[in-house]
Image: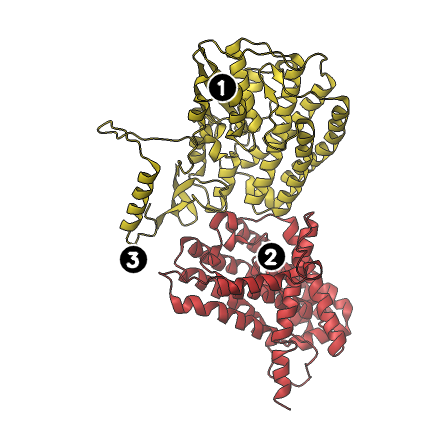
Chain colours: A red, B yellow
């Protein structure tokens, strides 16, 4: 029984099966919303209002021919998609959904915020390796752009996540969430940090306006140019799951987490992550892709100083409270 | 480290086959070159074996966007050869369709610019509004793309009061939408910053490299065939030549949006001053021996047709110079020292229509002066032979062509 429970956590909820189902739903939500914002209809035919379209896309990709370039490093090329998917699925286990207890366990301990953040930045490095090992010109450029962008958004995002943790006086996501559940007004203090984190998440997910590494009209598919079939399906799933985990992280840290046990917790999780995905989609619909130098400029001229400002505000508020 | 790379002939940014050969240093382009000839069209040769009337519908098929430009250019040339004065009402309707086509072409370009810059919503919006113009064209000519409206001596269909009223009603909608796009282009920071300062082409260089159309006008040269050498009824219409001084892609976008607004004014003027009378006059079948050089301001720039007649009912020679061809030299100059990220924008800013500009090219051997004619099977055998010789295992043979 003691083993069965963690296994259920890992495999069913909030682990693998829930993640796969919910992330495809989120992709549908994102696509449908994006389409409506652009005066289109979006997915329509597979399932009710096209809700199964992302699943159909992935099944289709699995059935497609899988090509490994002759000059590519075959083992790395094949292993990278699987690794990256495994990493984000692991990251999902650290989200404080219903099964968390006060006592530290394998997925909730002091410092899990940093672990989760670290796990979320690993896919970026894998994207770079994927681009590099494809030995294609476009992939190489895409891979280099992935890394260049990484230096832009990673530090503002970490600083932004730091301030709520400082205010709550804890490195444990569960405790941070509980702190804001008890004092909801203090959430407003972190409002700048919240938006910085959302923008940085958009950059991490490489969506417009930060889809620079795989800008279609410039460098074809970027780091994914040579990927096809199953491996591309893995990368697509990775993107969806990363979006859910990233949104979950922001919701847990800035918006008070998902309290109330199994069902209310699930409802809060869906509500809050969908709200963040809505923000991400609106950003994607309203903006145009920027250039890599403009992106770096923007992160260091605006995001990073604002994140530091947020940290100062938090320190001042904390001093006043004491 | 410098490395050479070829974009195209197949690339998502290029809607038609062309190859951009670039020497890159990191993300910066140090040298650029264009390679043409991936499209073989036999239109000029085909025109020699068809009658003047049949060629009306052939020239229309040179382009799928500015079809009316090529047809009108050809029609006006042949009318000059025939010494025929077209009906005034016919000329008004012809000019009206010219302007409607300009509206649809420019709206299409705006969408393409949005797509190349990664602004998909802009693309979707402009193309939705383009449908309004397409519907108008469909309604008054019967076709969405190849209107087949021109004939020697006027046009083939008349416009009635109901059609006039409907066009005037929908113009208001288009006007507000276009002003909205002008506003977006100027105020949406991610989009405006992508376009501003990209693909600089100074005034002197634009003139020296013989750029045409909005590319030239965005460099501050107010050159427009409609004003400089008026055809149809442009000499009776009050309108201004849109120019910009910023010499970059943003300027080219602004010129096009301004031209859209001018076009709405022209359409309104034409409809309100449409003269009564016949819309076509009878034209002779045969044409006297002569030659003519016909100019036309297509949405992309100056379009030129050269027609030579020999007294029969078929032209002896038809030479077409599409505006895209005139802009290639300027494109290479603009690409130099730009970023990789700007390639699609700079290239799209000339509004390239590669297939219009491509002709069948046969190169003679420069040393011996020999030229050879290959049959299709010979050509295929040659291609297979060449493909077999490539050693894919060898290093640096990834781009063997």
Dot 2: element: helix
Residue linked to disc 3: B393
Tell me the crowding category of disc 2: few under 14, some 14 to 19, or many 20 or more residues within 10 angstroms, Cα based.
many
Question: Marks 3/1: CA distance?
Answer: 54 Å
Question: Marks 2/1: CA distance?
Answer: 67 Å
Residue B385, position in %: x, y? 28, 46
Instruction: Indicate the quadrant containing the C terminus of chain B: top left, top right, bottom left or bottom right.
Output: top left
Residues at circles 2 and 1 in contact by the CB criterion of under 8 Å: no
Q: Nearer the viewer, residue B64 or A242?
A: B64
Question: Marks 2/3: CA distance?
Answer: 48 Å
Residue A46, position in %: x, y? 66, 60
Q: Give the chain letter at badge 1.
A: B
Q: Nearer the viewer, residue A308 or B123?
A: B123
The residue lying at 67 percent from left, 41 percent from top is: B128
Tell me the crowding category of disc 3: few under 14, some 14 to 19, or many 20 or more residues within 10 angstroms, Cα based.
few
Q: Give the chain letter at badge 2.
A: A
Q: Nearer the viewer, residue B140 or A68?
A: B140
Question: Marks 2 and 3: which is nearer the front?
Answer: 3
The residue lying at 64 percent from left, 27 percent from top is: B100
Residue linked to disc 2: A303
> Vertically, is B363 above or below B304?
below
Can the viewer see residue A322?
no
């Amino acid at each position: 029984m003691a083993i069965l429970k963690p296994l259920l956590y890992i495999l069913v909820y909030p682990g693998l099966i829930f993640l796969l189902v919910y992330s495809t739903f989120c992709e549908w939500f994102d696509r449908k919303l994006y389409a409506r914002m652009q005066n289109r209809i979006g997915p329509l035919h597979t399932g009710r209002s096209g809700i199964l379209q992302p699943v159909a896309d992935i099944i289709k990709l699995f059935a497609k021919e899988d090509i490994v370039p002759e000059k590519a490093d075959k083992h790395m090329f094949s292993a990278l998609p699987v690794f990256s998917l495994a990493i984000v699925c692991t990251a999902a286990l650290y989200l404080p959904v219903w099964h968390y207890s006060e006592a530290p366990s394998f997925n909730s301990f002091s410092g899990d915020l940093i672990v989760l953040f670290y796990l979320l930045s690993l896919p970026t490095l894998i994207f770079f390796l994927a681009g590099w090992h494809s030995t294609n010109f476009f992939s190489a450029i895409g891979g280099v752009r992935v890394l260049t962008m990484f230096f832009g958004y990673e530090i503002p995002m970490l600083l932004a996540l730091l301030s709520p943790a400082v205010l709550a006086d804890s490195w444990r996501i569960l405790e941070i969430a509980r702190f804001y559940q008890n004092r909801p007004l203090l959430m407003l203090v972190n409002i700048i940090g919240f938006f910085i984190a959302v923008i940085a998440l958009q950059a991490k997910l490489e969506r417009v306006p930060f889809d620079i590494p795989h800008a279609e009209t410039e460098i074809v598919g970027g780091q994914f140019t040579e990927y096809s079939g199953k491996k591309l399906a893995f990368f697509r799933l990775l993107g969806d799951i990363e979006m859910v985990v990233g949104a979950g992280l922001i919701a847990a840290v800035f918006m008070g987490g998902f309290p109330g046990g199994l069902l209310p917790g699930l409802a809060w999780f869906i509500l809050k992550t969908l709200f963040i995905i809505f923000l991400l989609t609106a950003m994607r619909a309203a903006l145009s892709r920027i250039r890599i130098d403009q992106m770096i400029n923007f992160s260091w001229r605006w995001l990073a100083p604002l994140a530091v400002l947020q940290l100062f505000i938090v320190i001042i508020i904390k001093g006043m409270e004491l | 480290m410098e490395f050479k790379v070829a974009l195209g002939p197949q690339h998502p940014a290029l809607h038609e086959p062309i190859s951009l050969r670039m020497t890159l240093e990191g993300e910066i382009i140090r040298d650029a070159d264009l390679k043409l000839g991936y499209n073989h069209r036999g239109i000029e040769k085909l025109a020699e074996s068809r009658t003047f009337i049949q060629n009306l519908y052939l020239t229309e098929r040179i382009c799928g966007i500015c079809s009316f430009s090529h047809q009108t250019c050809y029609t006006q040339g042949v009318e000059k050869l025939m010494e025929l004065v077209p009906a005034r009402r016919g000329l008004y309707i012809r000019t009206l369709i010219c302007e409607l086509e300009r509206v649809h072409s420019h709206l299409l370009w705006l969408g393409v610019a949005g797509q190349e810059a990664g602004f998909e919503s802009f693309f979707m919006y402009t193309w939705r509004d383009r449908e309004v113009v397409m519907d108008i064209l469909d309604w008054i000519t019967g076709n969405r793309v190849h209107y087949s409206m021109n004939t020697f001596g006027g046009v083939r269909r008349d416009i009635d009061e109901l059609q006039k009223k409907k066009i005037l009603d929908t113009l208001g909608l288009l006007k507000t939408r276009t002003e909205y796009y002008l506003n977006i282009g100027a105020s949406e920071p991610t989009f405006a910053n992508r376009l501003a300062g990209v693909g600089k082409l100074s005034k002197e260089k634009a003139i020296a490299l013989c750029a045409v159309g909005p590319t030239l006008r965005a460099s501050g040269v107010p050159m427009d065939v409609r004003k400089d050498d008026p055809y149809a009824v442009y000499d009776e219409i009050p309108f201004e030549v849109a120019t910009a001084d910023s010499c970059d892609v943003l300027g080219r976008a602004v010129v096009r949006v301004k031209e859209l607004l001018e076009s709405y004014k022209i359409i309104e003027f034409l409809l309100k001053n449409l003269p009564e009378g016949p819309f076509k006059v009878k034209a002779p079948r045969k044409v006297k021996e002569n030659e003519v050089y016909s100019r036309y301001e297509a949405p992309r720039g100056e379009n030129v047709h050269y027609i030579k007649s020999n007294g029969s009912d078929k032209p002896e020679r038809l030479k077409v110079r599409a505006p895209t061809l005139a802009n290639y030299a300027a494109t290479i100059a603009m690409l130099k020292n730009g970023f990789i990220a700007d390639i699609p924008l700079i290239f799209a800013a000339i509004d390239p229509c590669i297939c219009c500009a491509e002709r069948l090219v046969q190169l003679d051997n420069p040393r011996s002066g020999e030229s050879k004619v290959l049959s299709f099977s010979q050509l295929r055998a040659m291609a297979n032979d060449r493909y077999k010789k490539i050693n894919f295992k060898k290093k640096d043979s990834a781009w063997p062509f």
